[in-house]
Amino acid sequence: MDPGAGARKERPKAREAPARLEKARQRSAQQELKQRQRAEIYALNRVMTELEQQQFDSFCRQMQSGGQ
């Protein structure tokens, strides 16, 4: 109930604010990195799937021409 006690409580919060902001920035940067990596992985997966399909089609054509 002492007004001085309340003021003392606010001072540490004021000191913690920059640290909290920095942690929030780090979390945000980490999330952006994860999203970017995820997008890159999906793009790579799509490219690899297409390549695999092309190779399989080529293999099937070779087997058909070689079998006849």
Image: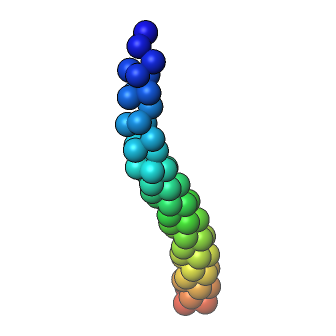
Q: Residue furthest top?
A: 1
- Residue 31 seen from this side: no
Residue 15 picture quarter = top left
- Report the number of numbered marks: 0
For this view, does 48 lie left or right of residue 15? right
Picture coordinates of residue 21, whole percent (x, y):
49, 50
Q: Residue at x 59, y 71 (%)?
A: 43
Q: Residue at x 41, y 36 (%)?
A: 11
As rendered, which of 43 and 20 lies closer to the eye? 20
As rendered, which of 21 and 49 lies closer to the eye? 21
Picture coordinates of residue 14, whole percent (x, y):
45, 41
Pick the quarter of the image with the N terminus: top left
Q: Is residue 67 above or below residue 52?
A: below
Residue 22 picture quarter = bottom left
Pick the quarter of the image with the C terminus: bottom right
As rendered, which of 38 and 50 lies closer to the eye? 38
Q: Residue at x 45, y 18 (%)?
A: 3
Q: Is residue 41 above or below residue 4?
A: below
- Residue 66 seen from this side: yes
Picture coordinates of residue 50, whole percent (x, y):
61, 75
As rendered, which of 23 and 17 lies closer to the eye? 17
Q: Is residue 21 above or below residue 46?
A: above
Colour mapping used in the image: rainbow
Picture coordinates of residue 7, whole percent (x, y):
44, 27
